[in-house]
Amino acid sequence: MSTIQEKKPASMYDNVMQQYYKVAERINLNENIKKILAITNNEIIIHFPVKMDNGDVKIFTGYRVQHNNALGPYKGGLRYHPSIDVSDAKALAMWMTWKTSLAGLPFGGAKGGIQLDPRDHSLAELERITRRFTFALGENIGPEQDIPAPDVNTNEQTMAWILDTYMSTKSSSQRSHNQHVVTGKPVGAGGLEGRDRATGFGVYLSIKLLLAEQGKSLKGKRFIVQGFGNVGQWVSHFMIQEGAKLLAVQDAHASLINENGIDVDQLIEHTKPRKGSIQGFIGAEEIEPKRFFGLDCDILIPAALGNQINQQNAYDIKANIIAEGANGPITGEGENIILEKGITIIPDILCNSGGVIGSYFEWLQNRNGELWQLEEVMRKIEKKFSENFSKVAKAVEEHQTDWRTASYILAISRIETAYRQRGIFP
Ligand code: NAD
């Protein structure tokens, strides 16, 4: 039995800043706007006490970083992980600004989380931690201010607790106007049908659309996935529906392979009573974690944490396509090696934007007091995602560059236009 060390990744912040300055130079971004986008507007750090099940009080540290809101309210996930800190939250908030801009949404970028390992806590403790953090955040979040969503180790239940706590601070006549303070809620609590699968669906669509550009299909393609949570499970689900084969999967606990293809439904069932872990699945063989990225496959989908693909393992990669389900899974050095090998990277800000597109529809649904059916939602996500994909594909041709650079050019240019048109107050 082997386990993967959940070590804190090297700085994702360095990575995002490097990506930003590279494109800012290339498009000759206005110097003043360059200064504004290089900083985060607000960095909120909250230390708060919570009573544990045994009666002891424990102090937790939570973060909410709001990078930019030139295009609309701040938007981004909340992550529960021992490694989250202000530097990671800054990087992830910045990626959200680029992502919402690229997707053509009326949102800015934010990210946050609480430094903890959810496996150390009961459900009742997690509820109290979430509610106390929400209360402490106060009006720093809000349906027209900053709208959290699920991320690593948070889910629709977490969003329901935030919603309920936030709404409890409002007068009864105001409560229904505040349902869109979070997205990714359970459907019964005002959530959107299909928001659960939106990110994985977008990742799958991006691969399908890229292959279609090359005159190919997903049929018979071998893919590997790192991370088997919300994103990893749903992308695998959609990929095998189109005839692709899940060769291998890795999570925080194990790395599994089956040359004949892993049964995705059975693996999902296996994880349910095991707090999401794939360990001990009998439909595949366990391998050394370090072999994972070098496996012989067509498509690699990182869908776990940042900085997983780096100088040490980038040379080994055999896939032709890397679809970034995770945010910032490849370091700058890793990326240089990969691009030199001729591998296409579908960048996070495009690849996993199905999630925030779904969140936008949830926000609109609540704001307008509407209720949409699953088919309608999936159609809307597919249309919006495909249009964005085509814009990036066109920019790749026009600028003769890689997909990340093309995505950044579009994302930053849209915000630059907004600043140019509006000017800077006062
Ligand atoms: P999740 O908590 O549901 O799943 C995370 C998975 O990663 C788990 O299977 C976990 O075991 C695995 N993992 C953790 N550490 C690992 C390690 N060191 N090595 C291998 N696997 C490891 O989280 P999620 O919501 O699926 O998010 C995954 C990634 O996708 C994150 O980078 C997140 O920011 C990004 N993302 C998520 C959404 C969304 O809607 N949930 C949207 C956009 C981007």
Image (spheres, rainbow, N blue to C red):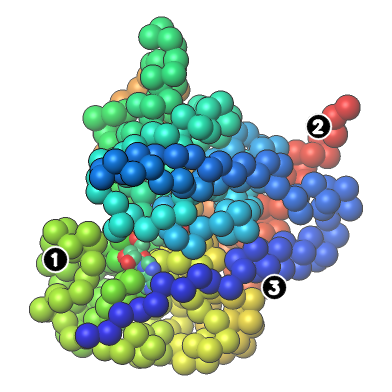
Q: Along the polypeptide, which appears first: circle 1 or circle 3? A: 1
In this view, 77 is above or below 176: below
Residue visible at 81% across and 32% down in the picture:
422
In the image, which is nearer the foreground, mark 3 or mark 2?
A: 2
Q: Amino acid at mark 2?
A: Arg
In the image, which is nearer the foreground, mark 1 or mark 2?
A: 1
Q: Please state the horizontal and vertical placement of residue 300, each as a whole percent of the image.
A: 40, 77
Residue visible at 39% across and 19% down in the picture:
168
Dot 1: what SS?
A: helix
In this view, 175 is above or below 333: above
**In the displayed structure image, the side of residue 389 where residue 24 appears, left or right:** right
Q: Amino acid at mark 1?
A: His
Residue contact between numbered discs 3 and 2, judged by CB atoms under 8 Å: no
Q: Amino acid at mark 3?
A: Gln
Q: Which residue is mark 2?
A: 422
Q: Callout 2 environment at 10 Å: few (<14), some (14 to 19), or many (20+)? A: few
Figure quadrant of the C terminus: top right
In this view, 300 is above or below 175: below
Residue visible at 51% across and 32% down in the picture:
136
Ligand 1 in which quarter: bottom left
Give the number of the disc on residue 400: 3
Tell which of 363 and 104 is nearer to you: 363
**In the displayed structure image, the side of residue 156 where residue 135 appears, left or right:** right
In this view, 14 is above or below 167: below
Q: Please state the horizontal and vertical placement of residue 12, each as a whole percent of the image.
A: 60, 66
Q: Please state the horizontal and vertical placement of residue 59, each as a whole percent of the image.
A: 46, 46
